[in-house]
Amino acid sequence: MTFQDIGLPSNSDDRVVWRFAQSNQMLLLTANRNAKGEDSLEQVMREENEPTSFPIITIGDPDRVNEYDYRERCVEKLVEIAIDIQDYMGAGRLFIPQTYLFKLMTRTIVSSPI
């Protein structure tokens, strides 16, 4: 789906896009974004993310999407997120595909006794 498909101007700032995605219960898929400015996606997420917010899904290395294996890993993770969306609400930004090291770190943090 493109900005034109949903009726947003192509020059919409990140705050407008974030709010539109949230109010329409949409996953926002993006390439890596900068954190510059008060309306940058990173800043908007920091200010407006809540436990019920849909995550921002960021392709970690958009230059590699043309590689079959990388693209397949992105698709697999995207499908996992969509199927288990309740587990990702409020997560803020999710990078796809996850690296093996990140999975190990996350598993260790999650399973650590408090």
Image: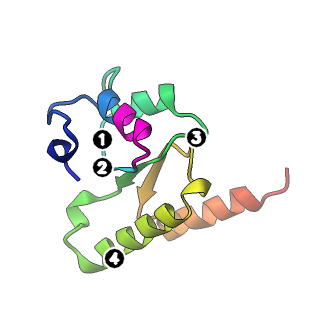
Residue at image mark 2? 30
Amino acid type of the residue that numbered disc 4 sits on in the rendered structure: Glu
> Which secondary structure lies at badge 4?
helix
Q: Is residue 31 above or below residue 76?
A: above
The residue under the point 44% across, 45% down is 25
Toward the right, the furthest residue is 114
Q: Nearer the viewer, residue 25 or 61?
A: 25
Q: Residue at x 33, y 76 (%)?
A: 72
Label whose residue precedes the other's in the sequence (2 or 3) = 2
Q: Which mark is residue 72?
A: 4
Who's the residue at 61% across and 67% down the image?
104
User: For mark 1, what is the residue?
Assistant: 33
Amino acid type of the residue tagged 3 in the rendering: Thr
Q: Which segment is the magenta one?
A: 18-26
Return the residue found at the far top.
38
Earlier-in-chain disc, 4 versus 2: 2
Whole-number angstrom distance, CA of label 1 to CA of label 2: 7 Å
- Disc 2/disc 3 C-alpha distance (Å): 20 Å
- Dot 1 and dot 2 residues touching (CB under 8 Å): yes
Q: Which residue is mark 3?
A: 52
Cα gap from disc 4 to disc 2, whole angstroms? 17 Å
Categorize mark 3 by other alpha carbons within 10 Å: few (<14), some (14-19), many (20+).
Answer: few
Q: Amino acid at mark 1?
A: Arg
Residue 54 located within the stretch drawn in magenta: no
